[in-house]
Image (spheres, grey):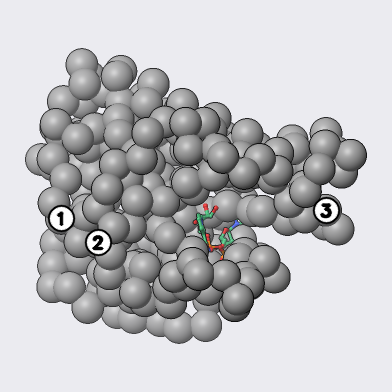
Amino acid sequence: MRQAVIIGASGGLGGALASLLLKTEGWRVLGTYHCTEPLWQHPLMTWQRLDARIEQEIAALVTRLPKIDLLINAIGILTSHHQGPEKSIRQFDAEHLMRTFEINTTPILNLAKHAQPALKASHEPKILALSARVGSIADNHLGGWYSYRCAKAALNMAVKTLAIEWQRSLPKATLIAYHPGTVRTALSEPFLNPASARIILSPAQAAAHCLQLLEAITPTDTGTFWDWQGQKIPW
Ligand SMILES: NC(=O)c1ccc[n+]([C@@H]2O[C@H](COP(=O)([O-])OP(=O)(O)OC[C@H]3O[C@@H](n4cnc5c(N)ncnc54)[C@H](OP(=O)(O)O)[C@@H]3O)[C@@H](O)[C@H]2O)c1
């Protein structure tokens, strides 16, 4: 059996990814939740509560696994308490920025730090960090959303930097940042504009695109940023 770990399996995308993997033969999944108690079970699914802001909890989760073949970090926030994405610099709040960073950026680094031995035990470990196109500096034509953009841009830098280190120490690994498209989930729902021409995916559709790409990528793709249509995004 191949072992997948999905951080944020209680979320829209993480849950759809877990369900789809469990329909694919040969996978067992360890999925995490934080505040949303899991509503479903499966014989090959194990649920574990995790606060991804706490390094010791991440370490305890991943070091008990002898092998990880697929690690997906599907957690993230766009809104914290009463603060949503900033339309203007006038709305900037440093505390919101820090909260955004500690959930969107820091966990992938702690996951990488502690999951290395289990990833090394796999013959082709794949690691996917859910990022967002708005984290691309090259693709930023609209502005706004300061905290989320900054946190995802920093996440992208973490992915690129880790990939460079792992080309030496974990050469069989493939690590990418990924934009799932605009997906109808709790995170995006308040900001979806039905009048916009943008395609809105269901979590199941988004998960199918994501797993298709995960099948296709190889270590030569490590340290790159992809979208749901299988196109590379410039950093
Ligand atoms: N939806 C979109 O259109 C879209 C577009 C681009 C990128 N993304 C990215 O895709 C990823 C998944 O987003 P989503 O739309 O599926 O969002 P979602 O449904 O709101 O799920 C967010 C997940 O993050 C978890 N989480 C939040 N704080 C946590 C913490 N402190 N410790 C551990 N887990 C925590 C939540 O757990 P609990 O619910 O259990 O607390 C939940 O599982 C995010 O990184 C997001 O930025 C989404």
Q: Quadrant of the N terminus?
A: bottom left
Q: Quadrant of residue 47?
A: bottom left
Query: Taking the image as drawn, is residue 18 in sight?
Result: no
- Relative placement, left or right, of 4 versus 105 is left
Vertical comparison of 147 with 191: above or below: above
- Mark 1, Cα crowd under 10 Å, few <14 / some 14-19 / many 20+, is few
Q: What's the mark number on residue 83?
A: 3
Mark 2 sits near ligand 1, with its Cβ under 8 Å away: no
Kindly identify the residue that appears in the image at 19 percent across and 35 percent down. Answer: 221
Upstream in sequence: badge 3 or badge 2: 3
Q: Position of residue 148 (x, y in %)?
A: 64, 44
Q: Quadrant of ligand 1?
A: bottom right
Mark 3 belongs to which amino acid?
A: Gln
Q: Quadrant of residue 97?
A: top right
Mark 2 belongs to which amino acid?
A: Leu
| Residues marked 3 and 1 touching at CB (< 8 Å) | no
| Residue where numbered disc 2 is placed | 211
Kindly identify the residue that appears in the image at 47 percent across and 31 percent down. Answer: 138
| Residue where numbered disc 1 is placed | 215
- Relative placement, left or right, of 153 versus 102 is left
Query: Farthest residue toward the right?
Result: 90
- Relative placement, left or right, of 95 versus 25 is right
Vertical comparison of 95 with 163: above or below: below
Kindly identify the residue that appears in the image at 50 percent across and 59 percent down. Answer: 8
| Residues marked 2 and 1 touching at CB (< 8 Å) | yes
Query: Taking the image as drawn, is residue 154 in sight?
Result: yes
